Image (spheres, helix red, strand yellow):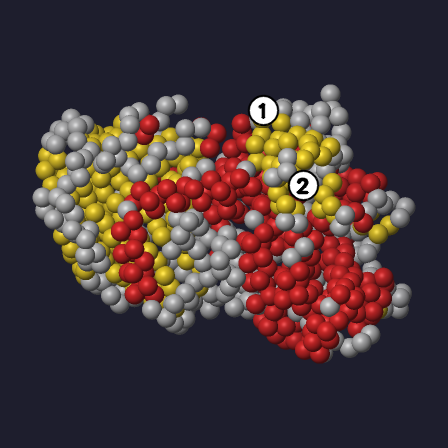
Amino acid sequence: MQNVLQQRPTRLADLPSNPTADQKWLLVEEGFSLSREHEIESLFAVSNGYVGTRGALAEGSRLSSPATFVAGIFTVDHKTGPIPKLAVASDWVRLQVTVNGHRLHLEEGEVLEHRRMLDLRQGILWRDWRHRDSAGRITRLRFLRLASLADRHVLLQSTTLMPENYSGRVTLESIIEKPANGEYFSVVASEPYSLSHRKHQSESQFLPATVALELRSPGTGVTIAMALASEMRTEDDRHIEQEFESGEGRVVQRATWEADIGETYRFDRLVCLYTSRDTSRPAEVAAGHLEHLQSKGIESVVKRHIRAWESRWETADIKVEGDSEAQQALRFACYHLISASNPEDERVSIGARALTGEAYKGHVFWDTEIYILPFFTFTDPPSARALLTYRYRSLPAARKKAAAQGYRGALYAWESTDTGDETTPPFVLAPNGELIPILSGRLEHHISADVTYAAWQYWQATSDERFLLDAGAEIILETARFWASRGRIEEDGQYHIRKVIGPDEYHHEVDDNAYTNGMAQWNLERGAEVSRVLQTRWPELWQKIADRLQILPGEPDEWQRLAECMYTGFDPETGLFEQFQGYFGLDEIDLAEYEQRTVPMDILLGRGRIAGSKVIKQADVVMLIYLLWGRFAPEVREANFRYYEPRTGHGSSLSPSVHALVAARLGDIPLAQKYFRQAAEIDLANNMGNAAGGVHVAALGGLWQASVLGLAGMQPQEEGLTFDLHLPPNWCGLCFSVKWRGQTLRASMNHEFPYIRLKPREERYRTRGRRRS
């Protein structure tokens, strides 16, 4: 497909860049379907980890849900409840075009051409639209939108307009309003002024128009300040003057001119955004930053952004030869993962839908550490460290939660926001109107071990001693202390952890969940190990930490003893772990009979019946097998996967990628491909029906793991990385990069051999792999 944006050389009034020429880097949506708008807005979001904007149409539609989110800015809507949710800032991309008084809109007149393209390589959303109005006038519009990866406070919108078969009076309005749910914010300043003292060499001597906005979040004291500069110019670089209209919560910048047939006109809007979390004078800083950017020019902003993405793709890209759908899915996954992280901010983490939608209120779950963080640990360690430091900063809240439930150490919130406090809603409204209590905030405790797992994996992969000494050790020690207080040794001499919820949330208040106990055992062992490492290598620091945390001399040894006594539910005769006590006695339900279902199994069966059955929501024992792979014999891995896989209903987006990974490691490539496709289609095909709430960023992280840690078989170990290759038959090759202890490794694999190349010395290493016919 030849892209219309590349059919002629760039002229002055054209967009300041062109899309990537390689179609493998483009996600294309042809045409317009009103019913899919919410879903498309999520998939085509642009973000940089600091600020994200959904891919809503600039002119809107009846079903548009535009939103801009700023990481770490939450608010409380007391009309709907006290639970904090990610605040929605103003829609900065809204435009309205009229031709001779007739509004251009996709739902009015005739759409001759409409195409949206997410340029994954450049991190840019492109749009091409040809419209014929009721009078037969054809207008061509082209759009560019980005959230700068080079300068995370910067947003850019650029639009060109060309009358194809007419000359006439055209008006372009750029509109900034309070958010639709405007009870969150009030506009406290909206006055047009000029930040630039430069004189443009044009007939009108026009200065770019600038607007300042401040939005305040009630009850939080947080201010979001936006400084916006816009300009309209002709093909020969003449500036078209704009008018201002300002009212309560609304600012309109309006340009009106006599447009000539075949001439191109360009509108640019540059936005700088700061919050009171960044500086005590956000509006002033935003205005000053904007003035600096204006002196550099729009093209400079775009070039720096593209260079930043190019640099990031050097270690993030995964190249698949022979499977175009897998290639697109993996690049789509990496795009949204990169877009979600901000290594410059250690106060925030990544919510379940990142900065692409409002589902789950922007809350942070265990998803971040187990599904998302490995991507950053192995491709962008500074981002991984920032995410883990968020957990370190929230240790006080984790200690408070543990103490409130009568435990010691740190129990992390199941859902958290900026403070780390527990923010899980107490109930959810079922489709039938029933209020269902949510117990995960009280009972889903495995998250403390999950955070420790991520911290340990990061240290193992990076050898970042500073992180261990400044943050990681304390996380590991305090979570180990929690597990030592969470259960007790009973009459059978084993350590039991009762009344929990494991990853399988279809079964509540169970005893000795295999995943929870297994990860708690591992966490206790790591706590004891870290204490030994600190005592041996950094004895003075250990003494300071022990004194501050009041760790008694024999406490780490007790952790090790409890780990050895842990009840695991393992049956040596069958090689199976019982998911929890009593699981094997539950009712069998053949999921094959429900293969054509379009809703989750708990909806089909009802809460009571699903709780009494062996149907599992998501990977539970299978997840334990994956995370602690080296602890289990090959026959144990195989037995547990074969037992639990047919009983898993995949009612969570987190489940398919883990099954793809484990199936790949076990050599069952057809099953691995099945689950890989299922994971890939969660967003790209909306196969769970809820992509409108934002992309499933944890599922995208799981897809990366399924490829690198599953199909490529990469396993991080103390002595280094090993690879055990299991490529699908139609994958002719797989190439990717990983960071390992300060080095960048380039992996290039095919069905014959895997090769690892160490940069920059060009040394080649043959790795363990299977030759496949």
Which residue corresponds to mark 1?
Answer: 322
Horizontal side, residue 200 vs residue 87: left or right:
left
89 vs 691, nearest the viewer: 89
Reply above or below: 163 against 216.
Answer: above
Q: Give the residue type at disc 2.
A: Leu
Relative vertical location of residue 6 with respect to residue 228 in this rendering, above or below: above
Foreground residue among 303 and 713:
303
Residue at the spot x=45%, y=58% of the render? 71
- Residue that protrudes farthest toward the top in the picture: 773
Label 1 CA crowd tier, 10 Å (few <14, some 14–19, many 20+): some
In this rendering, the answer to whether 551 lies above or below 724 is below
x and y percentages locating residue 16 in the rendered image: 30, 38
Q: Is residue 530 left or right of residue 353?
A: right
| Residue 539 in sight from this viewpoint | yes
Please tell me how crowded label 2 is: few (under 14), some (14-19), or many (20+) other residues with Cα within 10 Å. Answer: many
Callout 1: helix, strand or loop?
A: loop
Q: Quadrant of residue 518?
A: bottom right
Residue at image point 58% right, 62% down: 389
Instruction: Say whether residue 660 is left or right of residue 666.
Output: left
- Residue 649 quadrant: top right
Tell me what residue is drawn at x 79 percent, y 57 percent: 581
- Say which mark, if any, is on residue 709: 2
Horizontal relation, residue 128 to residue 512: left or right: left
Q: Is residue 608 visible?
A: no
Q: Separation of disc 2 and disc 1 at Cα?
A: 20 Å
Q: Earlier in the sequence, mark 2 or mark 1?
A: 1
